[in-house]
Image (cartoon, rainbow, N blue to C red):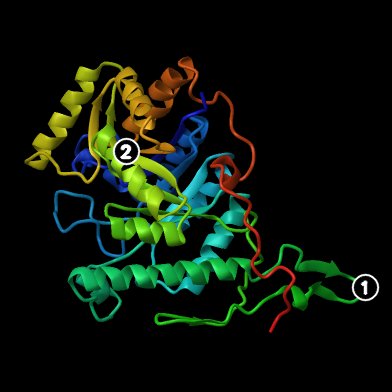
């Protein structure tokens, strides 16, 4: 049986909005480098495939009972890159209000800092409040708005990917005799012209170590499955049962070839009853059970291992677990769930070598401009 693919999604002091109220850490820790470094190192030691870092333009919530600020996800990933060795680093960055040229350089830089472990979770922003933060006109409404945002996102990803390819792998020649650092014939204009962007290129950053860092998307509907199939390598989905997982896998596979990870919010303890009580206490502090787009699991590691292995039969490639409270539930994943899966022979006992693309089984990223000339 092949190894299970396992990742975690990091957000604030946990995915439950009241998690900060019971945390042993000061809530302001989320604004420190040391906090994120600790979490990333824990994921690295736990042999996880990758971590994702949440981000939004506006505050995560207007509710004063929640943490109402966050650090920039791409910058956080860049900070923890040098102090981790194996785990992939995938920050969220929106396509709606960010220029793709800037995204391409930031993410290519992250790939260099992490020696080939970078990714990008592309996200759209439909919020008028987020548009107002940048002084932009709010997007429209309804289905037309969604399709416009997804079309813009697809163009943004295409521009970023072309810019990553705009330097051939051997463009840096460092020819001391002639004084040429680069071979200009191995740099390429991308000349992208579309409804949303007009970008000439080339990039200012040489082609990333992976060629193409891993692009991911969170999807809940067929429209976003289609966007993911057009633009991404990995899609995160939110089934609530094995049967629904099989239905979603069929829809995604019909849209295109993607690695499919199912998201679950996780409260995990050695004794399942403790996890259930922790979740109930947080719901009590929040004033009501907190809704979630993903299934919420609370229980013991053996129970979660059973669930993951049962759901994998639906055709999922892996799972992205969202720790309900940090750092507690992340440590429970790495120190309780991972050993349980290892005992069952379904999880690696040593780090996988290679880049993030290679470890996820993605194909080699061929440079689309190889053999062409600048101009």
Q: Quadrant of residue 246?
A: top left
Whether residue 98 is situated above or below residue 289 in the rendered picture: below
Residue identified by numbered label 2: 246
- Label 2 to label 1: alpha-carbon separation: 61 Å
Residue identified by numbered label 1: 177
Q: Classify residue 214 as left or right of residue 309.
A: right
Q: Position of residue 330 (x, y in %)?
A: 37, 33
Helix, strand or loop status at disc 2: helix
Q: Position of residue 206 (x, y in %)?
A: 66, 66
Whether residue 339 is situated above or below residue 317 in the rendered picture: above
Q: Residues within 10 Å of mark 2 (few under 14, many from 20)?
A: some
Between residue 231 and residue 63, name the one nearer to us. Answer: 231
Q: Position of residue 204 (x, y in %)?
A: 62, 73
Q: Residue at x 54, y 26 (%)?
A: 348
Q: Classify residue 155 as left or right of residue 202.
A: left
Q: Residue at x 57, y 70 (%)?
A: 162
Q: Classify residue 264 as left or right of residue 195.
A: left
Q: Position of residue 128 (x, y in %)?
A: 21, 72
Judge whether residue 32 can be spotted in this image: no
Between residue 104 and residue 347, name the one nearer to us. Answer: 347
Judge whether residue 17 can be spotted in this image: yes
């Amino acid at each position: 049986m092949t190894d299970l693919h396992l990742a975690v999604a990091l957000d604030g002091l946990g995915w439950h909005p009241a998690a900060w109220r019971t945390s042993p850490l000061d809530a302001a820790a989320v604004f420190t480098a040391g906090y994120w470094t600790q979490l990333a190192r824990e994921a690295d030691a736990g042999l996880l495939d990758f971590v994702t870092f949440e981000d939004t333009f506006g505050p995560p919530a207007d509710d004063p009972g929640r943490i109402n600020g966050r650090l920039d996800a791409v910058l956080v990933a860049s900070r923890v890159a040098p102090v981790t060795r194996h785990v992939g680093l995938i920050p969220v960055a929106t396509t709606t209000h960010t220029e793709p040229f800037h995204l391409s350089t930031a993410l290519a830089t992250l790939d260099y800092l992490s020696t080939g472990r970078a990714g990008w979770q592309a996200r759209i922003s439909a919020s008028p409040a987020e548009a107002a933060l940048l002084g932009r006109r709010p997007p429209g409404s309804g289905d037309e708005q969604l399709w416009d945002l997804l079309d813009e996102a697809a163009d943004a990803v295409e521009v970023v990917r072309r810019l990553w390819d705009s330097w051939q792998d051997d463009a840096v020649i460092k020819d001391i005799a002639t004084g040429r650092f680069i071979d200009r014939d191995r740099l390429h204009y991308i000349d992208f012209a579309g409804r949303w962007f007009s970008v000439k290129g080339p990039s200012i950053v040489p082609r990333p170590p992976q060629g193409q860092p891993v692009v991911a998307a969170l999807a809940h509907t067929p429209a976003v499955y289609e966007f993911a199939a057009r633009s991404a390598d990995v899609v995160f989905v939110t089934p609530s049962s094995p049967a629904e997982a099989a239905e979603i896998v069929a829809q995604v596979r019909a849209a295109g070839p993607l690695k499919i990870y199912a998201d679950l919010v996780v409260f995990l303890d050695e004794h399942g009853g403790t996890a259930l009580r922790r979740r109930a206490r947080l719901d009590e502090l929040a004033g009501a059970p907190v809704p979630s787009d993903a299934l919420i699991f609370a229980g013991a590691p053996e129970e979660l291992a059973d669930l993951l292995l049962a759901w994998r039969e639906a055709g999922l490639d892996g799972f992205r677990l969202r720790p309900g409270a940090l750092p507690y539930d992340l440590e429970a994943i790495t120190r309780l769930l991972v050993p349980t899966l290892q005992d069952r022979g379904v999880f690696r006992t040593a780090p996988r070598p290679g880049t993030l693309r290679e470890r996820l089984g993605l194909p080699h990223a061929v440079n689309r401009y190889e053999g062409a000339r600048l101009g």
